[in-house]
Image: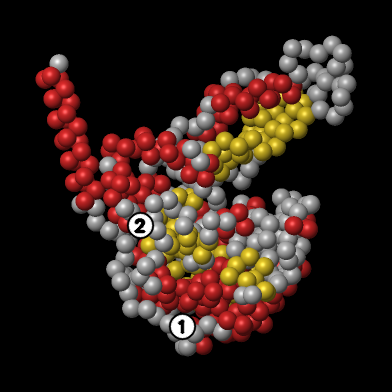
Amino acid sequence: MKRIALGILAIVAVLAAVVVTRALSLDSLQPGPETPVTLQVDRSGLAARFSQALTYPTISHQDRSDVDHEAFFGLHAHFAASYPLVHEQLALEKVNDLSLLYTWAGSNPALAPVLLMGHQDVVPVIPGTEADWVHPPFAGTIENDVIWGRGALDDKSSVVTILEAVELLLAADFQPIRTVYLAFGHDEEVGGPEGAGRIAELFDERGVGPFALVLDEGGAIADGLVPGVDGKVAIVGIAEKGFISLELKVEGAGGHSSTPPAHTNIGVLAAAIQRLENNPFPVRLGGASLEMFRYLAPEMPFMPRAFLANLWLFKPVLARLLLADPPSAAMVRTTTAATIFHGGVKDNVLPINATAVVNFRILPGETTASVAARVAEIIDDERVQIRDVSTSHNPSAISTPDGPGFDLIGKTLRQVKGDDIMLAPYLVVGGTDAKYYSGKSPAVFRFLPIEIGADGMQLVHGTNERVDLDSLADAVRFMHQFIRNTNDLPE
Ligand SMILES: [Zn+2]
């Protein structure tokens, strides 16, 4: 007995020694200190131009015939009037009428180009919530250095800060070495096929690419969002999940509700959805999700650092912790969300058909095909017809944070926002237009340095979307310095 106890004690001691040694030997992956770069930004001019951009209701609707083209044309005219040097010196093409593609020719056309992205369209205001807005969603109200309106965060902030930065650089006679493309889609919120998707095709047709670097929306500066890390963390998307919506349909005889079968079509469909919810996709903690912990672990106090430095031992525990909360759970599995359910027309008539739509966000490593196959396997009921009703796409490739593109983001951030800010790669659980460049650049990153606090995430697509002018001005400084820094990218 005693010998066994001693043996166990010895094993525990060795494990503890390994855990502590690994925790102590973690090196920081954060970028080194930088000399601050200052840039004077005309804050009131920026506020006015941004506020006006928010007044055009460039809303994406599921039904494209509902899109207000005049709103987009108004926004385009506003850009032309506000950024005269951009419109004089860069070539502008309108793609499918509403998307904007600017070309800023570099001094060395032999080098791989750089692509800066954003989208002009916004999501609708949910009917019935208009009165909950403190300021109307399309008024562009400025109050106490906060600018209110739909699109303030997602994603007119990207488009305007890029245009502001390029205008400033042109005024200072800056010449990029690499050709810089600015691509502003018009249908990101409905998948982006006619905007970013078409632009990506145009590049292919013209033999443009691969790109040295692609920067799109999808990351931000999180303040107090990462447990165990004090201070601000710039979370930079290095990959994004895939997307598929499957329609489930049950068709069959209707009839009178006085003589029903044991299960109506609604019951059959409900059971299918319940099986999907009861059999979630497997948990996998790896790739882009693990990269975040690799970057943040060295910055944490000893206990969480020891935990994260020893994922060979604690990975299942970490996965379980992440699963506890829907936002973090989305990082470790393909998610299942039943979003639409239709069936029946009258209380005394059996439904002839019932349909539902289930939306899946696909973890890197799986595909739209593997998801559809697993869904059929779990439902396992031939009465339920399954078909893809979405502009589905596979998860993106993962861009490495161990390269010059990611380093450039870190360097620029420290030049503009100081050395205290931390950097962490992460997996974007939503979707962005950057998916169209998966595999077309080793460095596709999703980030805009807007500061988002604990409540900020709800503002994206939510009520009372707004942005601080300070944050917006910093984003202009970031874009300005980022474009300058692309001249230092290695060939
Ligand atoms: Zn967006």
Q: Indicate the secondary structure of the residue bearing disc 2.
A: loop
The answer to which of 52 and 79 lies nearer the viewer is 52
Q: Residue furthest front?
A: 2
Residue under label 1: 39
Residue under label 2: 401
The answer to which of 415 and 7 lies nearer the viewer is 7
Mark 1 vs mark 2: in front:
1
Q: Amino acid at mark 2?
A: Pro
Q: Position of residue 429 (x, y in %)?
A: 51, 48
Q: Quadrant of the N terminus?
A: top left
- Left or right: 382 in relation to 55: left
Q: Is residue 189 above or below residue 86?
A: above
Visible residue check, residue 214: yes
Q: Residue furthest bottom?
A: 172
Give the residue drawn at x 69%, y 21%: 268
Q: Is residue 405 above or below residue 86?
A: above
Give the residue drawn at x 61%, y 75%: 145
Q: Amino acid at mark 1?
A: Leu
Give the residue drawn at x 47%, y 88%: 172
Earlier-in-chain disc, 1 versus 2: 1
Give the residue drawn at x 62%, y 25%: 274
Q: Quadrant of the C terminus?
A: bottom left
* Dots 1, 2 in contact, CB < 8 A: no
Alpha carbon separation for disc pair 1 and 2: 27 Å
The answer to which of 478 and 315 lies nearer the viewer is 315
- Left or right: 396 in relation to 75: left
- Left or right: 452 in relation to 130: left
Q: Is residue 458 above or below residue 265?
A: below
Name the colouring of the figure.
secondary structure
The quarter of the picture where residue 273 lies is top right
